[in-house]
Structures are given as C-alpha cells and as structure tokens.
Amino acid sequence: MLITVLVENTSISSDLGCEHGLSLFIKSDKYNILFDVGESALSFQNAKKLNVNITDVDFLIISHGHYDHGGGLKVFLEENAKANVYVHRLAFEKYYSARANKSLDYIGLDQKLKTNKRIIFTSDHFDINDNIQVFSNVVEKVPRPKSNKGLFVEHEGQIANDTFAHEQNLVIEEDGKTLLLVGCAHKGIVNILEHFYSLKGITPNYVVGGFHLSSRSSGNEDPETIDEIAEYLMDTKAKFYTCHCTGLEPYRRLRSIMGDQIDYLSSGSELTL
C-alpha cells in the first residue's frame, strides 16, 4: 500500500503548495482511494506534480464536514467522473468556528453539492467493501481535545457546540495488516482507538492522520495531556504517522516520548506500508 500526501499544512518542497487542510491518496492492491480533498484545488495541483492521476480514483472518503477536508469536493467532482463520495449523513450540516472578534465563520461544506448523485451518505458503521469500511459515533471515554473549543453546529436554527457526530474514520485491511486513517480526530485519538478495538478486537498496525492537538484559535493541548496520549499510543504497538491539526509543537513532544513510533507527514510525503 502506498500513501501519498497531496496536501497538508507543511511541504517537503517549495515546488509543492501547502495549506491548512489534508488530502491523502492511497494506492492499495485493488483500489485507488482518496481520503479528504483539502480546502481548495491545491491538492489536485499537487497531485499532477506528484504523478497522481485524480481520474483514476475509485472512491473518495470525506472524514467530516469541515472545509479544510472537503473544500476541494467541487473540483474533485469535475476532475473525476466515476468515483462515489462517501460522507457521513450529518456532514452537510452547517458548521462554524468562532474567531477572535467573537464572530462566527462558516467552515462547512458547499451546500450545493449535497444533492450530487455520486454522494453516498454513510452510517455509524458502513462497509464500502469487504476490506474497506468507515466508522463513526465514537464513544468518549476520555475528554475530547480542548482545541475543539469554539467549533459549532447550527441545529434547527440554533447554534450549539459541535459534538462531531459527522466525523468518520477509514479502515483498510490488506495483506494481513490494518490501516486506520483519521481526519482530525475531533473525538480524540484515544477514544477513536478504543472504539476501533471494540469493533475489531485488535489494534491497527498503522494509524495515519491529524490528532487535533493544536488549533489556530485555542492554541496547543496541555503538555500533560499530550504526554498521557503519547503513553497510550505507545502501548498500542501501532506505528503512527501524523500531520495537519496535530501541530508541530505537540508532534515534537509526542516524538520526544514515542521516538520512531511516530513520524510527521507533509505535502509530497510518500509512505509505503
């Protein structure tokens, strides 16, 4: 399995753009999978430079209903004429982020795309095929990251704290190994891994994605909490590749505890599993 990072907050080269977003191309034995599409068309511009043909994508999974993971959806539907798009049934609700001046900015998906015939709405446990599935409705055994503060959803005309019921995680099983992909881990990476274990009875071999230990509005997670997360992740024996909303400073703290068990991915990174 080959994973190519089409876009992330940082880049391995000045020839490749970066943005506050995430898009991963996964080439498995049988399928070409796209996990998220970043916040703009940049992921597709980078894809061309990385020799990734978007028209070859068999299906797209959008991890949750925020623009930095689904902002490129319109361009994807124009570039790729065949792939179904799997999103949680709540992903097209209206989501907002509080800014420093207390205003609310819309950070949701393009509402006009909701009725596209290629969009398939998923449930809490949804099989795409025998080896690929998504799951959501993660049980919260430990508190969610504090960096979720300031994220809201509009429900029946009222603004409420986002519960991230729209967040789904992707599982790919191939050649006797299991890969877990998370977009932002708004529900908490520990909770997601605990929920995965309750479904599978095992821990994944590899975990890739953002852990939401940092945000532009609320800063970084407490060092003590990061240390606790690092100890938990180490105990799983999985190999972790993180990026995006984990934040560079929290990543460095995780790395100082976990060592080679965790690495960072940037735009242009390629990973063979």
Image: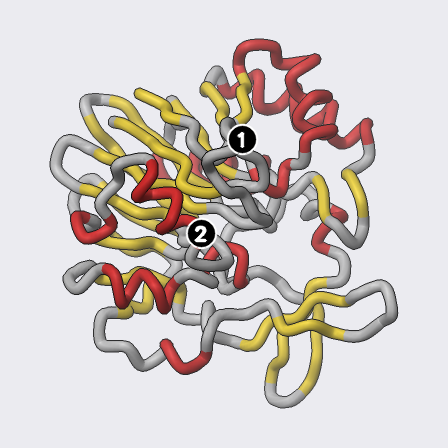
Q: In this view, does 1 lie above or below 59?
A: above
Report the residue that reaches farthest toward the top. 259
Residue 201: x and y in percent read 37, 31
What's the amino acid at mark 2? Leu
- Mark 2, Cα crowd under 10 Å, few <14 / some 14-19 / many 20+, is many
Q: Is residue 159 visible?
A: yes
Q: Is residue 273 visible?
A: no
Name the residue that disc number 1 marks. Answer: 242
Name the residue that disc number 2 marks. Answer: 42
For numbered disc 2, what is the local secondary structure? Answer: helix
Report the residue that reaches farthest toward the left. 30
State yes or no: discs 2 and 1 in contact (Cβ < 8 Å).
no
Between 193 and 80, the one lying in front of the other is 80
Residue 35: x and y in percent read 36, 47
Q: Which mark is residue 205?
A: none
Between 173 and 119, the one lying in front of the other is 119
What's the amino acid at mark 1? Thr
Residue 97: x and y in percent read 70, 66
In the picture provided, is 267 more to the left or to the right than 127?
Answer: right
Residue 203: x and y in percent read 42, 26
Residue at 60% x, 10% y: name it.
Answer: 259
Report the residue that reaches farthest toward the right. 101
For numbered disc 1, what is the local secondary structure? Answer: strand
